[in-house]
Image: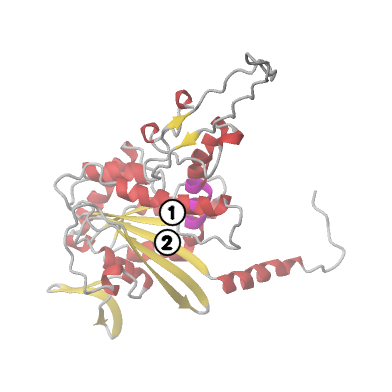
Amino acid sequence: MKTHLEGYVGIDTLTEQIRKKALRQGFEFNVMVVGGAGLGKSTLVNTLFKSKVSRRVCHPEEEYKTPKTIEIKSISHVIEEKGIRLQLTITDTPGFGDHVDNSKCWQPIMRHINDQYEKYLNEEISIKRRKRIPDTRVHCCIYFIPPSGHSLRPVDIEVMKRLVQVANVIPVIAKSDSLTEEEREAFKQRIQKDLEANEIRVYPTVDNADNDEDELGNNAKIKERIPFAVVGSTSQHQVAGKSVLGRKTRWGIVEVENEAHCEFIHLRNMIIRTHLQDLKEVTAQVHYELYRHKRLETLKKLPLDSVGSAPPSPNDANNITATKTPVPNNNNNKQHANNNGSPLKPSPKTPTVVKPIDAGNHVGQQALSESQI
């Protein structure tokens, strides 16, 4: 029931109160880039935020060598624009796709994403919680597709199938200036068909009931552009008397922010200018909530007096060892007597022992089977 106010109360100041408090606290945004070496991941991230924020730029002394296993490396920055302070964390995955055998190459990435959910959950359920829980959860995962011009590789399909279940995945065609306009458009159509055929639901979704008509229409337009054909560059060039970001070739300059040359501007607008908050909300309300549900679901299967710490992580049943010591029957709490007539003391109940496990595997798998309790 809507009630009409008879005079000014001041409810309209709530938005200003929220704005001031948010400005004091600042904002957090965590981006992960996934793709093989040489696809311009560091360059694209630096171009997105117009600053040197990638790990490769911040640590130029590191000589790249293909690691034996996939590594996860993060670096954080505080950037500020017009009084808005943003703590930005960039996570790179050196070694991804650079080996002869790339089977299960998604596991270290999945493990890292779930580890961040685990850290947040531990803070959330701790007795003495911080006033503000640090948010290290991955809000956006940019997946780099090599500009082959053919279709998605089997490894791309397998990795994205799993990543979309734990994070917001945005696929991009890296170094798209290596393709002609006709090749690029045909490549995008084949990728879209591969995504649909394999039921890979990349970000954003067009069937979110919380979105209004304008947001749904905007998301539908974005979906038509996915994967974004992008070019990254931090070099300035003069074009028609203006300084522009671009890549210089013998045929001319590929302008990064020119819609006629690539779709970088649409990617940046979506991630930063229109969907940054939504990326964070979907991470918290969908992906983290799913992890949290699977993680705490095991509590329903354990006696309350047997829980000694945080619940076990939702991983493979093979990684969980649960033992339960049977309690002798005391015949409805009546004490038995031994030969000399003295009463026997009931045996104390032995709590269930849960072996701590890694939080890296797929969260959708069964966490603890009934037969193990």
Q: Secondary structure under badge 1?
A: helix
Q: Secondary structure under badge 2?
A: strand
Q: What residue type is labelled 1?
A: Gln
Residue 238 coordinates in the image, percent (x, y): 25, 83
Note whether 244 is above or below 56 in the view shown. below
Q: Which residue is drawn at 47% across and 61% down?
A: 276
Q: Which amino acid does label 2 sit on?
A: Asn
* Mark 1, residue position: 116
Q: Which residue is drawn at 28% across and 62% down?
A: 230
> In this view, which residue lies farthest toward the bottom?
241
Q: Quadrant of residue 123?
A: bottom right
Q: Residue at x 20, y 59 (%)?
A: 37
Using the numbered discs, state the Cα–Cα distance from disc 1 to disc 2 in whole angstroms. Answer: 11 Å
Q: Which of 208 and 89 is in front in this view?
A: 89
Position of 264 compared to 330: left or right?
Answer: left
Note whether 134 is above or below 168 in the view shown. below
* Mark 2, residue position: 30
Q: Do the residues labelled 1 and 2 touch (CB within 8 Å)?
A: yes
Question: In this picture, which residue range is highlighted in magenta?
Answer: 279-288
Residue 51 coordinates in the image, percent (x, y): 35, 75
Residue 188 coordinates in the image, percent (x, y): 27, 50
Residue 260 visible? The answer is: no
Tell whether position 282 is magenta: yes
Residue 55 coordinates in the image, percent (x, y): 30, 68
Tell whether position 188 is magenta: no
